């Protein structure tokens, strides 16, 4: 048995599992709470650096010491648009700032940083980085913090996996391109830091940003110290790319629809992606084209939260509206008559001043219609994004992934009916864990590239995956 620890360090939870690379079988799949938001300012999303490392070490300790599992290595994926600013000694200057933080929209001397940067860069930012400008991107928030004199120069910016890899003060200080790109300073076509963006931040703030050097997928980024030995931590990768890989997507053949707290529609190596799409590094030298920040679980939580608040205001305990959402049927969705605008946060795809509910007629504003219409509006977003990528309907199939898609299996059949694509539901095992298993095969030399690695244990949508719990 060759056992490896897999960790998906997310915004709301941390998923982990043990995989045996001899059989492909999973075991000890666990979910842990993520580090809490410790921001002192309302609307900010921060996590204490020490708490993040403590959570990671506790997970490693639980498997190694409590469960007695002698894993040989650790694979990590995480959110891509969070960052930590370090001083010249490698110590944190401030808390870790999450992708959900949009402080760059706050005015400083009458002008918010997001408007300042987008005004100066225009379309140049997207053409260089591949990112559609968003107020939660580290590039925006780093500049904002620099304008507030909260950073010191030089300032090294690291993504979450880099910080976790230093949990035992034994890091190699390298970064995978899927994570470096998430910081917003990376030229996606050249595969290097865009020095013009570094220079702009320094001009506006006096802060010079530095970064760890790029490393390949099989690189070791640090070591966790077990009681007996140093266990390698491989270079962490972006959670979106990891889930697209784990769902079984193949270049130029499938469309990925990932529905979690956030959601995206993406294709690999697409010859002519739409102008709305962002570009991200993928594996094996491919680029991932994606329409991102499509309102997903975060938006559902906003509209469900209203119902829960009504219950509390009436002096009642809130009902389990998430279970009610799960119980909505295809027939309910077909008959749903309301239209929800789910873009309730500023960086959302299609944001236009906030969310709204339309089509309310007398007798129609009922709970079941509300919930069914919420799901119908959710699915329509993905159908619209898929149409932008594939107007001639040349893709072979659509593959769903993500926690929301897994908890709401009706989404698969509704999307298939709406788009006409053969649509595979989300896997029973989280796609990020499946993707990390594939990366483990690459990192340990069992395969030369991702397609070859993915074939070793089969694909979840083909019903031949050897994974087990």
Image (spheres, grey):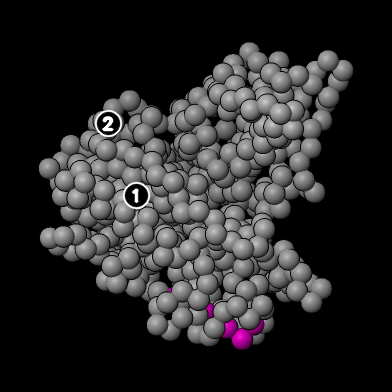
| Residue at screen point 38% across, 29% down | 428
Q: Residue 234: x and y, percent?
A: 29, 60
| Residue at screen point 65% across, 15% down | 332
Residue 101: numbered disc: none
| Residue at screen point 46% across, 81% down | 87
Residue closest to the eye, 227 or 195: 227
Q: Residue 378: x and y, percent?
A: 64, 33
Q: Does 348 sit above or below residue 38?
A: above
**The C terminus is located in which quarter?**
top left
Indicate whether residue 260 is drawn in magenta: no
Q: Residue furthest right?
A: 362
Quadrant in the rendering for residue 58: bottom left
Which range of residues does the magenta coloring cover?
Answer: 205-211
Q: Secondary structure at mark 2?
A: loop
Q: Residue furthest front?
A: 315
Quadrant in the rendering for residue 158: bottom left
Q: Which sits earlier in the primary sequence, circle 2 or circle 1?
A: 1
Q: Sort mark 1 into few (<14), some (14-19) or many (20+) by Cα contacts within 10 Å.
A: many
Residue topped by disc 1: 7
| Residue at screen point 43% across, 84% down | 88
Q: Sort mark 2 into few (<14), some (14-19) or many (20+) by Cα contacts within 10 Å.
A: few
- Whether residue 25 is visible, yes or no, is yes
**The N terminus is located in which quarter?**
top left
Residue topped by disc 2: 469
Q: How many discs appear?
A: 2
Residue closest to the eye, 164 or 47: 47
């Amino acid at each position: 048995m060759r056992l490896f620890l897999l960790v998906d360090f997310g915004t709301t939870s941390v998923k982990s599992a043990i995989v045996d690379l001899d059989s492909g079988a999973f075991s000890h799949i666990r979910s842990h709470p993520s580090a809490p938001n410790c921001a002192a300012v309302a609307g900010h999303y921060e996590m204490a650096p020490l708490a993040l490392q403590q959570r990671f070490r506790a997970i490693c300790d639980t498997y190694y010491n409590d469960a007695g599992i002698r894993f040989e290595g650790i694979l990590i994926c995480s959110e891509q648009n969070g960052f930590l600013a370090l001083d010249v000694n490698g110590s944190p200057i401030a808390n870790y700032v999450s992708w959900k933080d949009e402080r760059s929209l706050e005015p400083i001397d009458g002008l918010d940083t997001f408007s300042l940067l987008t005004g100066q860069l225009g379309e140049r930012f997207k053409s260089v980085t591949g990112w559609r400008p968003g107020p939660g991107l580290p590039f925006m928030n780093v500049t904002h913090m620099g304008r507030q004199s909260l950073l010191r120069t030089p300032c090294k910016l690291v993504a979450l996996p880099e910080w976790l890899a230093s949990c035992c003060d034994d890091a190699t200080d390298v970064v995978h391109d899927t994570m470096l790109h998430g910081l917003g300073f990376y030229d996606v076509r050249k595969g290097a830091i865009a020095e013009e963006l570094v220079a702009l931040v320094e001009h506006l703030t006096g802060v010079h940003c530095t970064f760890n050097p790029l490393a390949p997928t099989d690189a070791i980024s640090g070591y966790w110290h077990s009681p007996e030995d140093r266990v390698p931590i491989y270079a962490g990768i972006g959670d979106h790319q990891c889930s697209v890989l784990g769902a079984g997507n193949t270049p130029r053949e499938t469309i990925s629809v990932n529905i979690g707290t956030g959601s995206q529609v993406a294709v690999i190596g697409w010859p002519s992606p739409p102008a709305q799409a962002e570009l991200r590094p993928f594996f094996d030298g491919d680029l991932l084209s994606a329409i991102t920040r499509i309102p997903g679980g975060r938006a559902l939580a906003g509209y469900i939260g209203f119902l829960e608040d009504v219950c509390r205001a009436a002096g009642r305990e809130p009902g389990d509206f998430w279970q009610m959402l799960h119980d909505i049927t295809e027939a309910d969705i077909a008959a749903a008559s309301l239209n929800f605008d789910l873009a309730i946060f500023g960086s959302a795809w299609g944001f236009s001043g906030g969310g709204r509910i339309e089509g309310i007629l007398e007798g129609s504003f009922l709970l079941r219609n509300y919930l069914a219409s919420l799901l119908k509006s959710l699915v329509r977003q993905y159908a619209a994004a898929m149409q932008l990528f594939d107007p001639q309907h040349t893709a072979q199939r659509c593959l769903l992934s993500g926690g929301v898609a897994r908890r709401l299996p009706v989404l698969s059949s509704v999307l298939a009916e709406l788009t006409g694509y053969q649509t595979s539901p989300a896997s029973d095992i989280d796609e990020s864990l499946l993707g990390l298993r594939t990366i483990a095969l690459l990192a340990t030399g069992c395969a030369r590239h991702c397609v070859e690695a993915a074939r070793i244990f089969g694909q979840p949508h083909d019903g031949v995956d050897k994974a087990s719990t």
